[in-house]
């Protein structure tokens, strides 16, 4: 199997602006090509688009508008983890030899139809994600005796870290009191505990080993991939282990890269809602069961940006199809020591965790210099 | 009749396979274990509250009916493990709707 690495990337600010999905997609791709002039559009042999929008034929449109005539071009959709699913598809094309240079571009709008899985009728009249998040939160707090104030540290930390991310939606820091006093969505979920849908785009070019060696200034390799789908419907989740898919995908990715959780220096975690961050840290082996908030509190108090340095989904915003790609760009920048004020101290190994629909499916990537 | 046709009449049934007898959930025209045909079992089923939360004055809960788990509304604050029955169900704006008591 051929090695696959990251050659270049481009990203737009995440905003509440009314750009079309096509416009956002083109902007991040334009930035990618402008900032990486060594990547020639004519050399790209696959263009994959990640989006939940109802737009059609986006990969050929993006190809035409950026001067690419690829062999392979299509869209990938898998709700909130469309981005990393698209990266895995690109990886597979390169590893198999079907392509050598792949453009992956993701975009969504603040009103993306991917926010609610209409199919999942077992949720009854409670289809919006805030309801599964409330059930997760209540169950987690009950099982591990965690308070609302403790969980509030997740948004406090992630909004603080987003201040150093120029592309983040969040522009202000908040306190535990601000979180607790923010709008009560349910008894177990406050507004500031939620990631916000927004408009944004992120693009990345992946290449074969030869391409990476020829084109990348500071190569970052994808050395581990783990994916697991346990179901599509939220109620099929196992109540005592809501993040089973993350646990399995995390283990697969670490095994593939021959790493252990303790080897990970920096990680992007899918904090769609505050409770997701400690749950994911536990599922991925960063924290013992029930101890995720201890880890998060310690990182926050020591201003250690190891987890969600760009502010996570809560701080950076969540343009669904762009999120997994933006997470991967962040870990790449960190490994390249190119993350500005949010730079973690000399990381060598990074991890990306991206999931969909109440963790019914998860993708985990391990990246290394 | 299909699960949805009965649900739209306000009747909650448990879909099960005519061949392997396993419960089929989410409802489907065929069994997701053996691809056999599906029939509906009617009854006054007892469910158990697995978890719950509250939005404004209303409560909502994750309930298990045999091996079927659904989200349902409940008028009073439930207890974990509480036994409940379907009090009202239907299809509103193309979405299932469940209430337990």
Image (spheres, coloured by chain):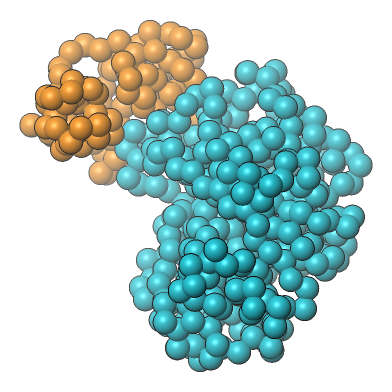
Chain colours: A cyan, B orange
**Residue at 42% in and 82% down:** A71
Res. B23 in view: yes
Q: Residue B53: percent from the left, percent from the top?
A: 52, 24
Q: Residue A52: percent from the left, percent from the top?
A: 44, 61
Asked if residue B36 lies left or right of residue A49, the reply is left
Name the residue nearer the viewer: A118 or A327.
A327
Quadrant housing residue A165: bottom right
Res. A126 in view: no
Number of callouts in the render?
A: 0
Vertical comparison of A142 with A276: above or below = above
The residue lying furthest to the left in this view is B1
Asked if residue B28 lies left or right of residue A322, the reply is left
Quadrant housing residue A180: top right
Asked if residue A175 lies left or right of residue A108, the reply is right
**Residue at 66% in and 70% down:** A6
Vertical comparison of A339 with A187: above or below = below
Q: Quadrant of the C terminus of chain B?
A: top left
The residue lying furthest to the front in this view is A1
Vertical comparison of A136 with A19: above or below = above
Asked if residue A360 lies left or right of residue A263, the reply is left
Name the residue nearer the viewer: B81 or B97.
B81
**Residue at 39% in and 47% down:** A117
Q: Quadrant of the N terminus of chain B?
A: top left
**Residue at 65% in and 57% down:** A223
Q: Residue A245: percent from the left, percent from the top?
A: 52, 38
Q: Residue A196: percent from the left, percent from the top?
A: 60, 52
């Amino acid at each position: 199997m051929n090695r696959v690495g990251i050659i270049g990337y481009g990203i737009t600010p995440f905003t509440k602006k009314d750009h079309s999905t096509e416009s956002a997609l083109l902007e991040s791709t334009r930035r990618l090509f402008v900032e990486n002039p060594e990547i020639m559009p004519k050399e790209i042999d696959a263009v994959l688009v990640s989006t939940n929008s109802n737009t059609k034929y986006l990969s050929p449109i993006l190809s035409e508008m950026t001067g690419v005539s690829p062999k392979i071009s299509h869209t990938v959709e898998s709700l909130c983890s469309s981005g990393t699913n698209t990266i895995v598809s690109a990886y597979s094309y390169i590893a198999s030899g079907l392509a050598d240079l792949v453009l992956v571009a993701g975009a969504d709008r603040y009103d993306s139809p991917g926010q609610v899985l209409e199919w999942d009728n077992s949720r009854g009249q409670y289809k919006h994600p805030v309801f599964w998040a409330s059930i997760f939160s209540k169950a987690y707090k009950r099982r591990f005796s965690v308070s609302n104030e403790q969980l509030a540290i997740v948004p406090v930390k992630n909004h603080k870290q987003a201040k150093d991310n120029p592309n983040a939606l969040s522009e202000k820091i908040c306190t535990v009191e601000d979180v607790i006093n923010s709008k009560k969505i349910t008894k177990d979920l406050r507004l500031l505990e939620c990631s916000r849908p927004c408009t944004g785009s992120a693009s990345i070019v992946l290449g074969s080993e030869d391409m990476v060696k020829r084109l990348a200034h500071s190569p970052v390799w994808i050395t581990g991939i783990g994916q697991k789908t346990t179901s599509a419907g939220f109620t099929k989740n196992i109540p005592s282990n809501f993040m089973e898919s993350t646990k399995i995908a995390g283990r697969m990715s670490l095994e593939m890269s021959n790493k252990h959780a303790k080897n990970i220096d920096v990680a992007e975690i899918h904090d769609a809602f505050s409770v997701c961050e400690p749950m994911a840290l536990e599922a991925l082996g960063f924290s013992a069961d029930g101890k995720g908030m201890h880890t998060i509190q310690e990182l926050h108090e020591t201003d250690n940006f190891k987890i969600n340095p760009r502010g996570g989904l809560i701080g950076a915003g969540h343009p669904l199809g762009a999120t997994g790609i933006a997470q991967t760009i962040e870990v790449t920048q960190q490994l390249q020591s190119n993350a500005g004020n949010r730079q973690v101290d000399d990381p060598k190994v990074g991890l990306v965790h991206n999931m969909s629909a109440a963790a019914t499916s998860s993708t985990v990537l391990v990246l290394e210099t | 009749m299909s699960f949805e046709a009965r649900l739209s009449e306000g009747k909650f049934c448990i879909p099960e396979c005519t061949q392997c007898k396993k419960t089929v959930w989410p409802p489907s025209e065929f069994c997701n274990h053996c691809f056999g045909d599906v029939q509906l079992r009617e009854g006054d089923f007892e469910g158990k509250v697995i978890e719950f939360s509250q939005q404004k004055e209303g409560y909502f809960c994750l309930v298990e009916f045999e091996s079927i788990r659904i989200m349902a509304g409940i008028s009073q604050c439930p207890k974990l493990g509480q036994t409940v029955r379907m009090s009202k169900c239907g299809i509103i704006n193309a979405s299932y709707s469940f209430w337990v008591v």
